[in-house]
Image (cartoon, helix red, strand yellow):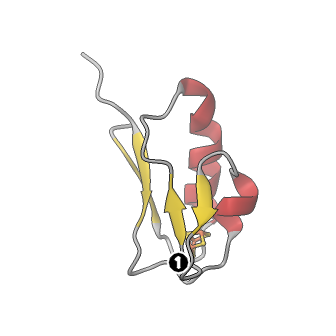
Amino acid sequence: WRTPVRVHVETERCQGHGVCVVTAPALFEFQDDGKAVAAARELAPADLDGARAAEASCPELAIVIEGK
Ligand code: F3S
């Protein structure tokens, strides 16, 4: 049994630093309000390094990986 892995941005924490967008552009983009949003899809194995790198580098600890 395998839990789907997803990543999301805690909007209340995000201050728009953009490290995630630079680190993993396939997974994160800016919304009109200057905060980041993560791809809603289930992460593929190839996405995991980028998701983890973004999670580790967000200064606001706003990035959460679920199901890992
Ligand atoms: Fe926001 Fe962190 Fe990305 S503050 S823009 S989620 S690096």
Q: Percent position (x, y) of residue 32? A: 57, 77
Tell which of 47 and 28 is nearer to you: 28
Q: Percent position (x, y) of residue 13? A: 43, 80
* Position of 4 relative to 2 (above/below): below
Q: Identify residue type, mark 1.
A: Glu
Q: Which residue is rendered at x = 41% and y = 75% of the image?
A: 11
- Name which quarter of the figure residue 26 lies in: top right
Q: Which residue is rendered at x = 53% and y = 82% of the image?
A: 33
Residue marked by disc 1: 60
Q: Which residue is rendered at x = 55% and y = 69% of the image?
A: 36
Q: Is residue 38 left or right of residue 27?
A: left
Ligand 1 under 8 Å from disc 1 Cβ: yes
Tell which of 35 and 67 is nearer to you: 35
Q: Percent position (x, y) of residue 42? A: 42, 34
Where ligand 1 lies, by image quadrant?
bottom right
Residue lying at the far top in this picture: please name it: 1
Q: Quadrant of the N terminus?
A: top left
